[in-house]
Image (cartoon, helix red, strand yellow):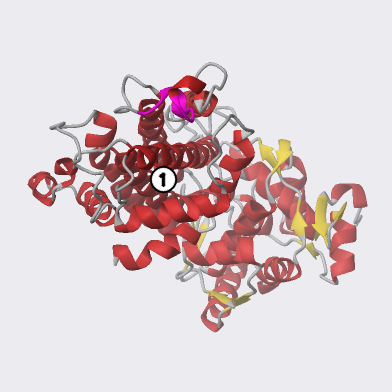
């Protein structure tokens, strides 16, 4: 069970809750944080001073003081008016991740909500009541206002308690109104008090949730990129000199050194490597540690930023002892947007150099004596297209990535009558990077599939050929899933099988002893 206290939530724990449905609870210290913050809020309310977000309007209406008796209506109106998202709904795992992050944020104890607000989010996660949340409509600056408001529609209400104002949610495999889903689950809906609406929807929470899931997947993706590189190096009878530790130590880039080290382990004891009189390879083989290594360094940097964000107080104002409300801008999604732009760029480069290796393996002028397009034998060329089209697919995905990787965080459109005059565009950065991630997964699967076929053909030509300690394991596992086919076949289901193999960590787990 995951225990949240607002300070120690891990990216790995978000994945376990979002995908594996691990249960959640509020820690004792978290309960204390929430209760203390609620007392602070009441102290501020009793002062009758105008305090943004507690007894004033929002955004451009911050100068409009609201009577305390209208506080519940103020919070409800905020949720109703801000639930204006559009587009396809977010996948369930993203919504679950966002619910956990928001609950953890409120548990930190700066938001002034009742304990019931956080308990409701936790109970919904544990009962798997998942709001339907549209994926478009957030700038990621005043938080993910629209997505979080759609989430809030499901578990909040007012005196009218209208079903049509409750949004939609999934419960026990059914899409229901939010009101009905909560009723069937036995979780009471809440009438919000002062500031509670703003505490729920003010923060780049959906952006942070997407970032956390993407980072987790990127970590294994970088490992797989090294496996596909090692396989291509074998298939192309590559030169090992470019992976010599001395070269990479001379530059001192840590990620680069780690990539080279892993490749040396994978190809150890291969007799295909260095089996030609070539003194150096093309950049896609020779410079791969430099290109793929920076992704390792970038991932480590971004991991720190997102780990902080999922444990951050991000609404506004924040409450401090002895009853002080400070208005600031922690809801601004710039850290998340910039971080995800960085991630999208380095992932795009991994796919780009991978596709270049696929191209070399299929080009008879570049593949060191293999048949054109890796047909079974040269005489079959023409009647058979070989792996011509998988390279097309890889090229298409790389081209899409090159567009998606243009930074989103440098773009801004002012909102709220220029009160919000610099916006982060963090949500678009997260969504674009998520699509890049999916594209890279497929490109690497194509490279692994192509390299396995090239190795088959290479071993036919060199029957005494021997793969390295790691690449032999990778090759064997691929061939167990998709046996070699001499003639043209329906390639895409086989590539999908390779993708399923590598992205369920089966190969990674099998190689752990080599990398250790």
Split into 4 quadrants, where in the image is the N terminus?
bottom right
Is disc 1 surrounded by few (<14), some (14 to 19) or many (20+) residues within 10 Å? some
Q: Residue furthest top?
A: 382
Q: From the viewer's side, name the closer residue of 206 and 258.
A: 258
Q: Is residue 374 magenta?
A: yes
**Quarter holding residue 58:** top right
**Quarter holding residue 179:** bottom right
Kindly identify the residue that appears in the image at 41 percent across and 29 percent down: 410
Q: Give the residue at mark 1.
A: 335
Whole-percent x, y for residue 350 in the image: 38, 37
Kindly identify the residue that appears in the image at 62 percent across and 61 percent down: 19
Total numbered labels: 1
Whole-percent x, y for residue 206 in the image: 59, 49
Kindly identify the residue that appears in the image at 23 percent across and 56 percent down: 269
Query: Considering only vertical position in the picture, is 509 above or below 212?
Result: below
Split into 4 quadrants, where in the image is the C terminus?
bottom left
In the image, 132: left or right of 499? Answer: right
Magenta stretch: helix, strand or loop mostly: loop
Q: Which residues are magenta?
A: 370-377
In the image, 163: left or right of 296? Answer: right
In the image, 515: left or right of 80? Answer: left
**SS under mark 1:** helix
Q: From the viewer's side, name the closer residue of 261 and 405.
A: 261
Whole-percent x, y for residue 238 in the image: 24, 38
Q: From the viewer's side, name the closer residue of 166 and 255.
A: 255
Res 176 seen here: yes
């Amino acid at each position: 069970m995951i225990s949240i206290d607002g300070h120690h939530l891990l990216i790995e724990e978000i994945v376990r809750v979002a995908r594996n449905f691990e249960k959640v609870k509020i820690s004792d210290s978290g309960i204390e944080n929430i209760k203390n913050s609620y007392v602070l809020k009441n102290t501020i309310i009793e002062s009758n001073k105008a305090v943004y977000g507690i007894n004033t309007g929002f955004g451009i209406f911050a100068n409009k003081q609201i009577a305390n008796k209208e506080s519940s209506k103020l919070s409800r109106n905020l949720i109703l008016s801000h639930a204006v998202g559009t587009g396809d709904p977010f996948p369930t795992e993203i919504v679950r991740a966002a619910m956990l992050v928001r609950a953890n944020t409120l548990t930190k104890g700066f938001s002034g909500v009742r304990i019931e607000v956080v308990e409701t989010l936790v109970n919904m996660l544990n009962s798997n009541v998942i709001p339907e949340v549209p994926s478009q409509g957030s700038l990621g600056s005043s938080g993910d206002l629209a997505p979080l408001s759609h989430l809030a529609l499901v578990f909040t209400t007012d005196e009218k308690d209208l079903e049509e104002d409750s949004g939609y949610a999934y419960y026990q495999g059914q899409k229901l109104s939010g009101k009905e889903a909560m009723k069937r689950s036995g979780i009471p809906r809440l009438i919000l008090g002062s500031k509670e609406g703003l505490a729920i929807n003010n923060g780049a929470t959906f952006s942070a949730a997407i970032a956390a899931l993407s980072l987790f997947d990127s970590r294994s993706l970088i490992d797989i990129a090294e496996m596909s590189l090692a396989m291509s190096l074998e298939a192309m009878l590559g030169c090992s000199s470019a992976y010599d530790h001395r070269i990479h130590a001379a530059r001192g880039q840590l990620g680069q050194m780690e990539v080279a080290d892993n490749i040396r382990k994978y190809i150890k004891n291969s007799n295909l490597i260095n089996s030609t009189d070539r003194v150096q390879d093309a950049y896609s083989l020779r410079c791969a540690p430099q290109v793929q290594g920076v992704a390792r360094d970038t991932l480590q940097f971004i991991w720190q930023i997102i780990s902080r964000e999922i444990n951050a107080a991000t609404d506004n104002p924040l409450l401090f002892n002895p009853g002080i409300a400070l208005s600031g801008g922690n809801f601004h999604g710039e850290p998340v947007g910039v971080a995800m732009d960085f991630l999208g760029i380095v992932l795009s480069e991994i796919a780009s150099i991978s596709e270049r290796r696929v191209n070399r393996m299929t080009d008879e002028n570049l593949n060191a004596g293999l048949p054109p397009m890796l047909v079974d034998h040269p005489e079959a060329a023409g009647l058979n297209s070989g792996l011509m089209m998988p390279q097309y697919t890889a090229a298409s995905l790389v081209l899409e990535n090159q567009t998606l990787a243009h930074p989103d965080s440098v773009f801004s459109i002012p909102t709220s009558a220029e009160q919000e005059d610099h916006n982060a565009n963090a949500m678009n950065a997260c969504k674009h990077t998520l699509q890049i991630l999916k594209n890279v997964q497929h490109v690497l699967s194509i490279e692994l599939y192509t390299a396995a076929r090239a190795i088959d053909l290479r071993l036919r030509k060199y029957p005494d050929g021997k793969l390295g300690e790691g690449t032999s394991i990778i090759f064997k596992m691929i061939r167990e899933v998709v046996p070699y086919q001499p003639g043209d076949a329906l390639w895409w289901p086989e590539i999908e099988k390779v993708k399923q193999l590598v992205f369920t960590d089966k190969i990674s787990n099998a190689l752990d002893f080599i990398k250790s």
